[in-house]
């Protein structure tokens, strides 16, 4: 399986590094892309993590942010053209989500906090699923409009901004990614 990870926040890099390392140890191919900022490049170098730097997001008091996100997704599309991506795992990159939708890739969105705003487009896209901690009440998920059939639940808590990860939870998450991919592909074959 070929998994695509995108970085748009330097705080997520240690998590992406641990996730990528474990995926590779299980025999999966991993493509990592990252937004073009000096801070992201610096943290990538500090963590000795290789990523293809693609596009940037411009925001002046919120202006141009959505437009530049769409432009970055176009650049990501060009880069992904020749890669055989099976599934994407997102920690919140909008550009990655847009690129997945335009390429018809399945995508899993990791939701650390159910209070986060969830784009309605994500809920409507058939190949979008969500990873949510088991400590988030089911009622909160329903209130967000998320179909419970599109949810993978993992035990424990992973904080993206922490530098420490519970390996058991990380391994469970990767097993869920593998299962989600096989579930999505089976559903599409029917």
Image: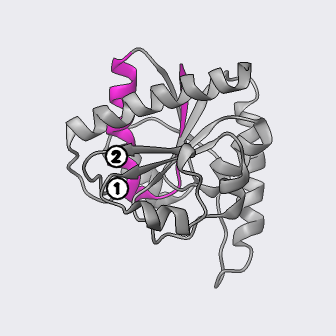
In terms of secondary structure, what is the magenta stretch mainly? helix
Q: Position of residue 116 (x, y in %)?
A: 49, 69
Magenta extent? 1-26
Q: Does the image show residue 85?
A: no
Question: Quadrant location of residue 103?
Answer: top right
Q: Secondary structure at mark 2?
A: helix
- Left or right of 126 on screen, residue 144: left
- Left or right of 21 on screen, residue 88: right
The residue positioned 46% from the left and 19% from the top of the image is: 28
Q: Are marks 2 and 1 in contact (CB under 8 Å)?
A: yes
Mark 1 lies on residue: 160
Q: Does the image show residue 66?
A: yes
**Screen quadrant of the C terminus:** top right
Q: In the image, which disc is placed on residue 15?
A: 2
The residue positioned 66% from the left and 54% from the top of the image is: 122
Q: N-terminal of the two: label 2 or label 1?
A: 2
Q: Position of residue 163 (x, y in %)?
A: 23, 52
Task: Tell me if mark 2 has few (under 14), some (14-19) or many (20+) residues whose alpha carbon lies within 10 angstroms of its own.
Answer: many
**Residue 29 colored magenta?**
no
Q: Is residue 166 above or below residue 133?
A: above
Q: Nearer the viewer, residue 138 or 11?
A: 138
């Amino acid at each position: 399986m070929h998994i695509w990870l995108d970085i748009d926040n330097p705080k997520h890099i240690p998590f992406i590094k641990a996730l990528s390392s474990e995926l590779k140890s299980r025999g999966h191919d991993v493509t990592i892309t990252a937004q073009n900022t000096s801070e992201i490049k610096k943290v990538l170098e500090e963590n000795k993590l290789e990523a293809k730097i693609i596009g940037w997001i411009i925001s002046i008091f919120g202006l141009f942010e959505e437009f530049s996100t769409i432009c970055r997704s176009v650049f990501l599309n060009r880069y992904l053209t020749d890669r055989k991506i099976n599934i994407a795992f997102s920690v919140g990159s909008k550009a990655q989500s847009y690129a997945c939708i335009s390429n018809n890739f399945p995508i899993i969105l990791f939701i650390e906090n159910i209070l986060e705003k969830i784009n309605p487009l994500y809920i409507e896209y058939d190949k979008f699923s969500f990873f949510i901690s088991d400590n988030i009440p089911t009622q909160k998920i329903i209130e967000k409009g998320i179909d419970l059939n599109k949810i993978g639940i993992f035990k424990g808590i992973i904080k993206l901004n922490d530098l420490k990860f519970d390996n058991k939870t990380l391994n469970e998450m990767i097993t869920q990614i593998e299962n989600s991919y096989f579930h999505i592909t089976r559903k599409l074959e029917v």
